[in-house]
Image (spheres, coloured by chain):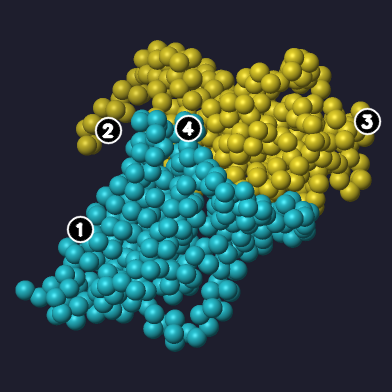
Chain colours: A yellow, B cyan
Amino acid sequence: MMGRNKIATLISAATLALGASFVNAEDPLKVGFVYVGPTGDAGWTYAHDEARKYMEEQLGDKVETSYVESVAEGPDAERVIRRLAKDHGLIFTTSFGYMNPTLKVAKKFPKVKFEHATGYKQSKNMGTYFTRAYQGRYLTGLVAGKMTKSNVLGYVASFPIPEVIRGINAFTKGAKEVNPDVKVKVVWASTWYDPAKEREAAETLMLQGADILTQHTDSAAVIQAAESKGKFAIGYHSDMSAYGEKAHLTSTVHNWGDLYTQKAQAVIDGSWKAEDVWTGIAQGSTDLAPFNDAVPADVRELVEAKKAAIKAGEARVFDGPVTAQDGSVKAKDGESLSDGDLQGMNWYIDGVEGKLPQS
Amino acid sequence: MDFDLIVNILFATIRTGTPLILIALGEMVAEKSGVLNLGQEGMVLMGAVCGFMAAVVTGNAGLGVIAAIIAGMVASLLFGFLAISLVTNQVATGLALTIFGIGLSAFIGAGYVGMAIEGITPWEIPLLSDLPVIGKILFSHDPLVYLSWVLFGLIFWCFRSTRIGLTVRAVGENPEAANAIGIPVMKVRYGAVLFGGAMAGLAGGYLSLAYTPMWNEGMSAGRGWIALALVVFASWKAERILLGAYLFGAASIMHLVLQGLGFEASPNLLAMLPYIATIIVLVVIANDSIKAKLSTPLALGQPYRPQV
């Protein structure tokens, strides 16, 4: 063992002496991924794994990837991340609960770069990233506001945390902009994932007059429920059109591929630095699934125009006037909510029905 | 609250209670024979994934249901072999079956995530479904709901007035004595466990073929555990299982409906409603705690080694 270590040290010293460019040509950058769920779940982890494959395609033999799936958030995560850190140059940890374990391991492996999804803690060799999914929500709100006949939209939500509330508010803002009479009814299922319960929540909303549904839970049960009752629905996380040929209008989808490619390229170039990246429509990390034929041409045009404006930085989702449900003004005309406001959002925008539960 | 809404709540109550009825009745039969199988969640998932896969491959949801039942039985056979023949600890074996079932169903079903099928559609029963109110609430469900009633009737009748019911109970109360009067204890226990597996598999098929026609990992979402608790609260009585399951269903529907009506309460609190309702009502029904104790199969969880 001793001898082998010595040889390894000698070789690495030699390669270092020969310069970084030589190393790049010889050794691919090893990129590790830690997933919270199984890759086949068609939701969150699925989107990350698709991005990993996309990165491999883009960078070819410059990178070599590996992943560990279904890693529980907690002590297990730290062990997995530590193991990956021993022979990887860049590690993506893709769930909020990995934040502290990632930070801990990052301190012990200063030469390895870490990227953590959805967290808020950074260090010299650990950055964070997230998508602005609410931009997609806003665009789907435009579709729903234009297409509703009953002026009641239904929203199956999971838990009252800022990420979910931001989605509800963005959706409502879009719908209200094109249809001032619209109301959004929210039902909290109190679960991220229980298809049967999500379906019952959807049916409850339809019973109370909602003719277009969307959800911030993980299964496609809401789409199925809408399909079986002849209503419309909008999906989330990935393209859910397979579950409702007639019902599915579009979905807000996550697209991490470009971000992963850029980050890996930056490590290879030596230009990587720890930062907080919140990308969205402009970078393509938030997008919409293809429209159903039922979506009229003028609605598509409107959505495309708004999307282009957001992409160009000419418009933002929470541009004022933004009025909260209780009548207080959150942003005046000409103002816009800051990223900080968005990250801590704990109030309903005007147009949402019912009271926001205290989490 | 308007009348239509109440009708719809009752209709949804039946749909929500159905998987619980199936799982709990199956587990009750196994427990009556003295075998405690905690593998419900695993068997339900095996049923759900195999039923869905069979329906996709054959294009026939009916064959899917049969496959679901068989999958549940195969899983319970594995449990039976370990717990009955090899006399392993029933609690540990059952838990292992749950973990095994969760993992295996995810593994074999990985390629089937995201597929859409039509599934089992409701059957309106002629004449009966035309009845006012009752017709909508009771007779416009999918066939598996009606099947759950038939199975309930069979099990209720079986334990009330047949020899088979007595035999199963005898084995669960005192296997040695049952053996002494010539009852094949092992066979009865195997039969009861296989029946429990078939019911759990059917419940899985109900979830993946009728309730939400799709396959996704862990889609039973803890129903196996709720059903296990239901058996105890219902003190091993089929009619109380039926009642408890519907109460549970009603409470979980109410939690969603009340929110839609603008009822102001924490949804987390409301989400507890079904659990609280089930416990309260079943405790009230069985308020005589000694009676409840007495209805527990005495040999429950105890392995039986036949004397050679």
The chain containing the residue under callout 4 comes to B
User: Residue A175 falls in which quadrant of the image?
Assistant: top right
Image height of B17 relative to A18, above or below: below
- How packed is label 3: few (under 14 Cα within 10 Å), some, or many (20 or more)? few
Residue at 70% over, 42% down: A206
Circle 2 residue: A5
Circle 3 residue: A333
Residue at 57% over, 54% down: B138
Dot 2 amino acid type: Asn
Dot 4 amino acid type: Ile
**Disc 1 and disc 3: Cα gap in Å?**
72 Å
User: What secondary structure is found at the residue carrying circle 4?
Assistant: loop
State which mark lies toward you, 2 or 4: 4
The chain containing the residue under callout 3 comes to A
State which mark lies toward you, 2 or 1: 1
User: Observer-nearest residue: A191 or A49?
Assistant: A191
Tag 2–tag 4 contact (CB < 8 Å): no
**Disc 2 and disc 3: Cα gap in Å?**
65 Å
User: Residue B61 falls in which quadrant of the image?
Assistant: top left
- How packed is label 1: few (under 14 Cα within 10 Å), some, or many (20 or more)? few
Image height of A40 relative to B263, above or below: above
User: What secondary structure is found at the residue carrying circle 1?
Assistant: helix
**Disc 3 and disc 4: Cα gap in Å?**
48 Å
State which mark lies toward you, 1 or 3: 1
**Disc 1 and disc 4: Cα gap in Å?**
35 Å
Residue A129 at least partly seen = no
Q: Are marks 2 and 4 on the same chain?
A: no
Q: Which mark is drawn over residue B81?
A: 1
Instruction: Give the x, y percent position of residue A137.
Output: 71, 31
Q: Residue farthest to the left?
A: B308
